Amino acid sequence: MAEKQARSVLVTVFGVVGTACFGFLALEYVIARYGALEALVALPPPLGLGDFLGTMPDWSAYAVTSGIWLGLLGAVLLLLGDRASVLVLALAFVASLVASVWGALVFVQGQELMTTIRPLEYVSALLLGSFGLWLYARTAKRYGRL
């Protein structure tokens, strides 16, 4: 294990960007799950997970939920400079990988557009976001910047 060095500015930048992205996904998820909030805060047509989460099988909905919330927790831990962010972001990546299996199955079946969201693009963005943050956190931990 490398010695802990001075905190890099990039750790803060990646933490802020990851928290903002996963924070928006978490906000969108909360609005979709609670009908009263969906009526109060109307999102533009390409956004909104309400109907999208209802069309998923349970295992994929759980994987998307886990990917969003673990990604937000990992990004906040990265922002705080905690080494546990590597483990949490790895779990978010695995959850997103499980959800991407469903996105690929839907794409292969020819259902490219469900409600206003393309499933493969949504879960792929979740997968790439969690993978990118995990890779950076792992590298920063390895070189003693985290």
Image (cartoon, rainbow, N blue to C red):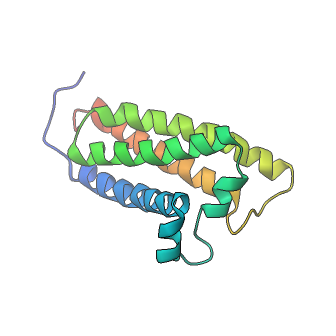
In this rendering, is residue 144 above or below 38?
Answer: above
Rendered-image quadrant of the C terminus: top left
The residue that appears at 37% across and 61% down in the rendered structure is: 20
Residue 9 visible, this angle: yes
Q: Position of residue 73 (x, y in %)?
A: 35, 44
The residue that appears at 67% across and 64% down in the rendered structure is: 117
Marker count (numbered): 0
In this rendering, is residue 47 above or below 141?
Answer: below
* Drawn side of residue 83 relative to residue 132, left or right: left
Q: Position of residue 41 (x, y in %)?
A: 47, 75
The residue that appears at 54% across and 65% down in the rendered structure is: 35
Task: Determine which quarter of the picture holds residue 48.
Answer: bottom right
Residue 41 visible, this angle: no
Residue sitting nearer the eye, 109 or 69: 69
Q: Residue furthest right?
A: 109
Q: Position of residue 119 (x, y in %)?
A: 69, 56
Rendered-image quadrant of the N terminus: top left
* Drawn side of residue 88 relative to residue 1, left or right: right
Task: Determine which quarter of the picture holds residue 136.
Answer: top left
* Drawn side of residue 50 relative to residue 142, left or right: right
The residue that appears at 45% across and 34% down in the rendered structure is: 90
Residue sitting nearer the eye, 100 or 132: 100
Q: Residue furthest left?
A: 6
Q: Position of residue 126 (x, y in %)?
A: 54, 51
* Drawn side of residue 42 relative to residue 15, left or right: right
Q: Residue furthest top?
A: 1
